[in-house]
Image (spheres, rainbow, N blue to C red):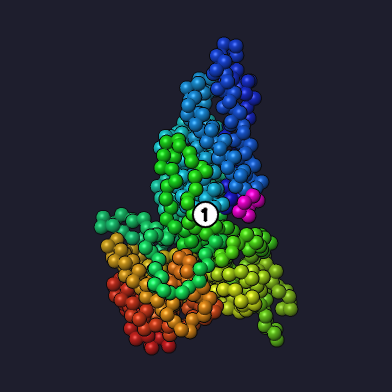
Amino acid sequence: MEDVCMEQNRCPAFCNVNTVQKVGIMTGAENEDDIPVGERKTVTDFCYLLDKSKQLFNGLRDLPQYGHKQWQSYFGRTFDVYTKLWKFQQQHRQVLDTRYGLKRWQIGEVASKIGQLYYHYYLRTSETSYLNEAFSFYSAIRQRSYYFQVNKEDRPELVVKKLRYYARYIVVCLLLNKMDLELSEEIEDYTQRFNTEDQLEWNLVLQEVAAFVEADPVVVLNDNSSVVVTSNRLQEGSVPALEQGMVVGQLVLADALIIGNCNNQVKFSELTIDMFRMLQALEREPVNLATQTSKGTLEPNEKPAKRENPHKYLLYKPTFSQLFTFLSASFKELPANSVLLVYLSATGVFPTGHSDYEGPYDFGGVLTNTNRDVVNGETVQKRNQAQKEMHCLHPGDLFPFTRKPLFVIVDSSNSSAYKNFTNLFGQPLVCLLSPTVYPKSVQDQSQRGSLFTLFLYSPLLAFSSVCGLNSVRRGLWERAQEFLRKVYRDIGQMITRSRTIDQAFLQFFGDEFLRLLLIRFVFCSAALRLHKLFRESRSFPESYPELPKQDTVESSLLQKHILELATMLDVQSLFWDDSLEAY
């Protein structure tokens, strides 16, 4: 996602400026000697800051994409120059208007760059506070109509700048669940006025945004039928507390690789809907760092007292080489007593035969990016069965990384390949695996995201969806969420009190993000087992190591809770009243 955004920034904010000549040009017939020295120095200083900011911004493309430390000082310098530039144009606006000919769209371009800096700082740090800062600058551009006059000028390149600003703004709005933009009107105006070659590309952007916004299968409605915006990031009180005296691991989730390589799944920019949901499941609700940012106050170096979220890499359709490089970088920099999470949302790759010895490269895996043909959503192997698929992440490819605590989530039609793990090094290791087969009614919705990931992101959204509900009233939704908090507490106790559960689950249970994912996984497994449409064992999630079923996913108490929730939503007829009937 970062590469694409940087690539689109090759057009600088303004034309390159020879500062002294620029003063002469912008003041028209006025002789340079007639300009007061102070005003001339103001324009010269402004042009210097402008050129310096452009150089630093363009240099961001050359920074390594992985590694936590190499980029921070460079970002700091870039923030510093943009802070000075922003304040300088505010303090000397009148001189710059008259002597430089500063346009409002040029001010908007500086603000847009600052918004991009905050957004990329968020991508690098995973701290959601910086999303709010990006939103502040982007929304200020809109509120102050910095780009308003652009449509009146006969310069399509300026309109493209405006459209790119909107596209970036939309990404931030999506991540903050704040969708209220008129991009469609802007694109329509642009394509009608300028018959350009990129018309189809911008219309495609519009289609992607619409599909992304409409991807949630269930909406929450107010009494007046307006849509309620719900957030599924980690909130205060949303994670069941550990029981007093409960001994669990002290491991902390430090790094996460979120990988999306599903064919035909809704996406925007370089973010599939599954990636979008999982990254939010690994973040806390954002808070403002500087509430006055939109008024021009910049505090780019201010940071939260402690890291709130695990650091994340978002990899859209990576090659095997790219994926392995990012894995290695995360593994290398993983602090002591920390966990690396790998989330794979990808098309399944299946083997074409069975050898006498079945090892970690004999079950296939998930697709990595290549130009190979894809048939019916699954890759077809075209070589003899003695050779393994190259463009595939096999379970064995992850073995070297099990030297440190590893938490794997696989959402794929061949997730079961990752059951064949061996814990070679005795470190904590858990794999949560999606169903490999869904009922047709669920499969038909797969373009809007996987049901399994939806359960890990918002169990109530997923539960309502699998029950065929399209909307839920706000009051009912809030009662159901409150009920689920009680269910989560009970599931947490089932996990920690079980005498037969593998210790790996308990070692991860001390981290709030991993605790919630494990609890949601158990809820998902139990709910699908009771649902009448899910008849095959392949339609149930699995895990490595296996969970003790009687203590967790087949617990009579949990089954009772699921039936109570179904009754609350008036969908009890879709579930088995007596769980024995299901087997």
What residue span does the magenta drawing correspond to? Answer: 64-70
In the rendered image, residue 334, in percent from the top left (x then y), is placed at 60, 62
In the displayed structure, would residue 420 be above or below residue 114? below
Tag 1's secondary structure? loop
- Horizontally, residue 487 falls left or right of residue 309, namely left
- Horizontally, residue 110 falls left or right of residue 216, namely right
Who's the residue at 64% across and 25% down the image? 18
Q: Residues within 10 Å of mark 1 (few under 14, many from 20)?
A: many
The type of residue carrying mark 1 is: Ser
Specify whether residue 66 is painted magenta: yes
Who's the residue at 40% across and 66% down the image? 239
Who's the residue at 40% across and 86% down the image? 582
Count of all numbered marks drawn on residues in the image: 1
Q: Residue furthest front?
A: 245
In the rendered image, residue 286, in percent from the top left (x then y), is placed at 43, 52
Q: Report the quarter where the C terminus lies.
A: bottom left
User: On the image, numbered disc 1 is attached to which residue?
Assistant: 126
In the displayed structure, would residue 319 be above or below residue 579? above
Specify whether residue 241 is painted magenta: no
Nearest the viewer among 550 and 446 is 550
In the rendered image, residue 522, in percent from the top left (x then y), is placed at 44, 75
In the rendered image, residue 444, in percent from the top left (x then y), is placed at 47, 69
The image quadrant that residue 343 belongs to is: bottom right
In the displayed structure, would residue 338 be above or below residue 195? below
In the displayed structure, would residue 244 be above or below residue 297? below
